[in-house]
Image: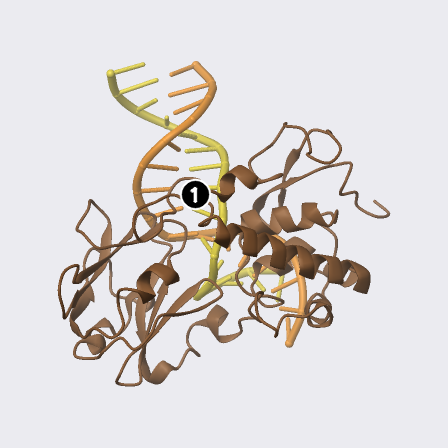
Chain colours: A brown, B orange, C yellow
Amino acid sequence: VRRGLVEWLPTRTILEAGRVDAPAGPKYRNLERATGQDILDVNRRGKYLLLPLSGGDTLVIHLGMSGVIRQTTSEKHIRACLRLSGPPPNKLYFQDTRRFGRFLVAIDSDFSSIPTLNRLGPEPLSADFSASGLLRGLQSRASIKALLLNQRPVAGLGNIYVDEALWEVSIHPALPGKQVTLNQAKKLKSAIVDILSAAIASGGTTLKDYRTLSGGEGEFQRALRVYGRTGLPCPRCGTRIIRSLIAQRGTHSCPKCQPLPRG
DNA sequence: ATTAATCCCTGGAGGC
DNA sequence: TGCCTCCAGGGATTAA
């Protein structure tokens, strides 16, 4: 999504910004401040799109589960809108059916009121991401799955990619993070990098809502090994993939390849 | 301070 | 066909 936006938005001026079908609140804060500012760039940290503005503020966008950025007024559930300078397309619509997304202006680029963004782990595809740092971030009694989902040991992993990465390195998703060995952390780090790189190269994973800016679907869903494959054979050993509930999330794993030590 | 559970929200799927 | 219940999940919030 960022790659689409960066070809379009810099350095247009926001002529008007506002909420549409969304209540006032922290998810749509300070949008009026964007009016009159230029969009300097389109950056990303974890799952957050960060658009620095010429007045020192930052437009923060999180797509949540069902968020889509559109160049035309499509259908229902348009939560916010930008009117832009320059030739068409010069309107940006934020459509978010399930309302898990957000679209707000961080004044003076201060993210301290956005908890997850404020304490976000390293970018997985940057040199800041290391096996030793990952291991340090996993020193908790919480499950490896919960830890990888909370964005602190590393940024950007959601439920799909966590299941895929843990299957790749044969770690049970309920394993307490502090039981992960350095050797496992090294493999996990590599698996995360490989899976995210491949997913990005495939244009992402479209299960239902996700679309690129141009409306296309991703292709990585075809490459998924365990996510959404309950009852189908494990690509490694043929055992049926099972689905369980770990960290309040649907979790897919191979009961043979990903045993839980001790019990 | 850490960790676990709850809640938000809508559309689609499945049961009857 | 229509009504009902359940489920999906990122992350903020509340509870323990």
Percent coordinates x, y for residue A77 in the rendering: 24, 49
Percent coordinates x, y for residue A4 in the rendering: 33, 59
Could you tell me which quadrant the N terminus of chain A lies in? bottom left
Q: Name the residue under label 1.
A: A206
Name the residue: 69% across, 72% down: A133
Using the image as rendered, state which of residue B1 and residue A58 is in the foreground. A58
Please say whether residue A181 is visible from this viewpoint.
Answer: no
Direction from residue A208 to residue A162 in the image, left or right? right
Could you tell me which quadrant the C terminus of chain A lies in? top right
Name the residue: 28% across, 71% down: A29
Q: Is residue A117 above or below residue A181?
A: below
Using the image as rendered, state which of residue A172 and residue A235 is in the foreground. A235
How many numbered marks appear? Answer: 1
Please say whether residue A202 is visible from this viewpoint.
Answer: yes
Using the image as rendered, state which of residue A124 and residue A22 is in the foreground. A124
Direction from residue A233 to residue A224 in the image, left or right? left
Image quadrant in which you'd find residue C4: top left
Image quadrant in which you'd find residue A206: top left
Q: Is residue A207 above or below residue A196?
A: above
Looking at the rendered structure, the kind of residue marked 1 is Thr
Name the residue: 14% across, 69% down: A86
Image quadrant in which you'd find residue A104: bottom left
**Can you name the residue that lies furthest to the right here?**
A262
Using the image as rendered, state which of residue A234 and residue A21 is in the foreground. A234
Instruction: Give the class, few, some or many, for how many residues have Cα within 10 Å of label 1's Cα (few <14, many ≥20).
Output: some
Name the residue: 34% across, 48% down: A98
Percent coordinates x, y for residue A128 in the rendering: 61, 74
Percent coordinates x, y for residue A101 in the rendering: 36, 57
Element carrying mark 1: loop
